[in-house]
Image (tube, rainbow, N blue to C red):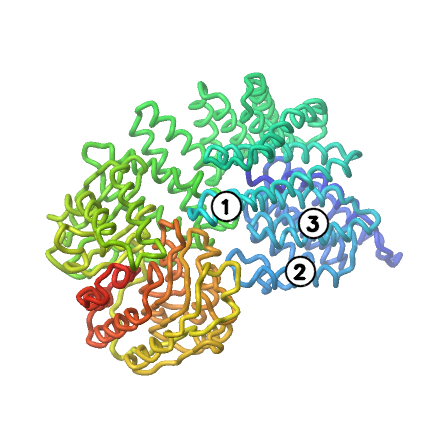
Amino acid sequence: MIRRRDWFKYVFSSILGLLTVVAKPSIIAAQAVNKEAQKRNQARLLTQIGEKYLNEGRASEALESWKTATKIYRQLGYEEGITGSLINQNLALQALGLNRFACNTLLQALKLNIDTKICAILPQQSTESTTKLLIAAIDKQKHLPVNLFAWHNLGDVLRLIGKLDESKVVLAKTLSIAQKTSNVDNHEILLSLANTQEAIYKQARNKYYEVEEPDFKNEIVELIQQQALNSLEIYHQVNLVSANYPVTQLKSQLHHLSLLIDFDNFLTTELNLGNSKLVEIRNQIQQKIQPSVNIILKDSSIFSQLSATQLVYTKLNFANSLSQIPDQQLRSLAIEYGQSALQTAKSTSNQRIKSYSLGTLGKLQPEKSEVYFLKALSLAQSIQAEDIAYQWQQQLGNLYKKQGRAKEALTMYKSAIDNLAHIRDSILSSNIDIQLFFQQEVEPVYRDYMKLLLKDSNPNLKEVIQINERLQTAQLENFLNCGKLDLIALNDIPDLNSAYGIIHIIDLDETIEVIVQSSDRSLHHYSVEANIVKDNVSDLLWSLQDQKLATIDVQQILLPSQALYEKLIAPIASYLPASGTLIFILDKSFQSIPMSILYDGKNYLLEQYSIAATLGSRIRYPKPLSKKRFTALIAALSKPSPSLLDRNAPKGVRSLPKAKEEVKDVQSQTQSSLTLLDEKFTTPRLEQEISKNNFPIVHISTHGQFSSDPLKTVLLAYDKVINIREFDKLLKGKIQTDADAIELLVLSACQTAKGNKRSTLGMAGVAAQAGARTTIATLWLVDADSTALLMEEFYKGLKNGIPKAEALRVAQLVLMKNPKYAHHYYWAPFLLVGSWL
């Protein structure tokens, strides 16, 4: 499907419908008829001009035209006209990619308070509270056609900014009212509801590709089936109720076909992985694809009823669907529809749809792809459409790489990455596509660029590091579903400790690339075949994530640990200091392995170095913990709580009765502290204390879980589970400046979900959301007595002025040298993320 054009599905029919509404004359005094009629006519003319501009792709001019119309209606005090013009402004803003502004404009049209954060991209409040607010607002308002139209538009925009649950609630409620209201056609609202349901399906489908844990994947497979079938059923309902509205019916049929093909691709992927339960449903879906195509082809004359812009996008979407069906005749037909769309696009002044048409033909006709992509890119650049330019740059990069034109490929990949960065940093990041398609479509651009850079006989290692840094940061922002994070690159820190080594371990699928930066900032590179390393990674993770880790034979850990040392560390050992700090920037597959555990045959890495990890070599500015700021907020759960029953809580966990002892130990080691134990450890109380007090240290002893699913990356308060995306609101409270940052966040009873290879992503996410300079957490749930001893030694070291990473190392060595706690289970799970000072 051509994405990010959903607003075009009803723009023109909606505007024409609106003109009917806003053109109704009000009863006025006879002496004012001429003057008021003149202004009304001026506003109507501006509305029509705006429609013409939007159809031509001149969204900025359309917006100005509709702003002027709004101003006139305000002068007239004509409420329906004001509402209608604001709705039109929202359409222009959507065309410009400014979906959040479009959303706020609709709030004005509906007389809702912008400060409610309904349109905020970041999760400032829970979905439940937002939906209750929206339902109450709908019930409170008069159910005039223009108001229902505004609510319909709001439901669509909420979908575009990723608030799918809210979109579904608004559209369902609006549809229910519209079905009971005369003079309101509900078929378009039902189509919007189907589109939102399809977006919910796609959200689940994309989550499937990002989540690693087998148990969680199985849950998502069930969810995907349910959401796909629900969406297909609603499209079927649209077809039934829109029998007298052929354009709506065509749009529904095109979405229906696209969804059938997408769902079939997903089911095929699962079947290839051995999920035989899906054979029957896959067969049912496949049997519906050709009949769906036939229905659209039979009624193809309906395409001619669309406006030029709508016609282009619908034909391109149909062409994309046809091209995915393994039938040569249909693929030839796809090219015909693509070429027809291009001819229509050329008849307009809309450069955006011309670019999309050319780019789509580039995908459909590989033999002519370079010419098409270059023309498409030129048009996208001429209107500064970065969100489509990067797609053609990526396609050209792939093409040039296949042709062996490395220099040109590098130029295209670099430009694509720059455009992606601009998109993510700008208001365009509010569009859901950039969030949802990250792993499948965005991440490969970065990795392909790094692969090509490293093929050079004298690779630019500094550039590789910078690109990896940007990729890791983008991954973290995508994981958190947030905007740009306030982090600093390690190379931008002027005074690092004199004895250090920064080790980048980058997974480029076929190879693992190791780049070390020495204390003199010189760079050294080593490459190893990925399959040799990944087997050992899998073996080690299998042992470390085993529930019976405490009883596993040490040799099961030592053998893969030593193999990883030999493959990853030994080749670069001569570039490392004799002692000091090693800072690891770990890529996928390596983030759930404590680097301290790597073994050279005699000693563990921990015995020689203090160790820290960062994501993308970016952290909050590192500072040592001042002895004068040794106050702590301590929160702990020592008995059963309601949160243990939450479906997102870690499975099979029990209460932590010895957490009370840990609390006492931390209290004794800090200058002053506030303790929230059991019933006092609630989310409102935690938020309250963080917001009104400045605690340099926050120590939390409760069950936590790191997962590749952000909703299952959680901590348990007494009252509820707190997922990682809620940390921003909960722990950042009053943290507005670097000086207010939490210096040290300790999470002492966490574990990694079975199968997750990216624990550092979760830990770095917690640190970023909490505004913490340093986070220490455990990779698996450890013994309470050994943890208490480690924390006692750790805080003792901090009080004596030892840097955080070194204090943790000393504490771990105390456990390692104690015969009772010598097993890896006791000392190895502690990981420091962020500032090591």
What residue did someone put label 2 on? 134
Residue matched to label 3:
152
**Callout 2–callout 1 Cβ contact below 8 Å:** no
Quarter where residue 113 is shown = bottom right
2 or 1: tag closer to the N-terminus? 2
Q: Residue at x 82, y 51 (%)?
A: 181
Residue at mark 1 to residue at mark 3: CA–CA distance = 34 Å
For the residues marked 2 and 1, what is the alpha-carbon distance in whole angstroms? 33 Å
> Which numbered disc, 2 or 1, marks the residue closer to the eye?
1
Q: Which amino acid does label 3 sit on?
A: His
Quadrant housing residue 823:
bottom left
Task: Name the residue type under label 2.
Answer: Leu
Note whether residue 1 is visible. no
Secondary-structure class at tag 3: helix
The amino acid pointed to by label 1 is Asn
Task: Tell me how far mark 3 sits from mark 2, CA to CA.
Answer: 12 Å
- The image quadrant where one finds the C terminus is bottom left
Where disc 1 sits, the SS reads helix
Q: Mark 1 points at which residue?
A: 218
Mark identifier at residue 679 = none
Q: Is there a contact, CB below 8 Å, between mark 3 and mark 2? A: no
Q: Where is residue 326 in the image (x, y as percent from the top left)?
A: 54, 22
- Label 1 or label 3, whichever comes before in sequence order: 3
Locate residue 718, reporting x and y percent: 49, 71
User: Relative to 252, is 297 above or below?
Assistant: above
Residue 132 image point, x, y percent:
65, 62
Q: How crowded is mark 3: few (under 14 residues within 10 Å), some or many (20 or more)?
A: many
Residue contact between numbered discs 1 and 3, judged by CB atoms under 8 Å: no
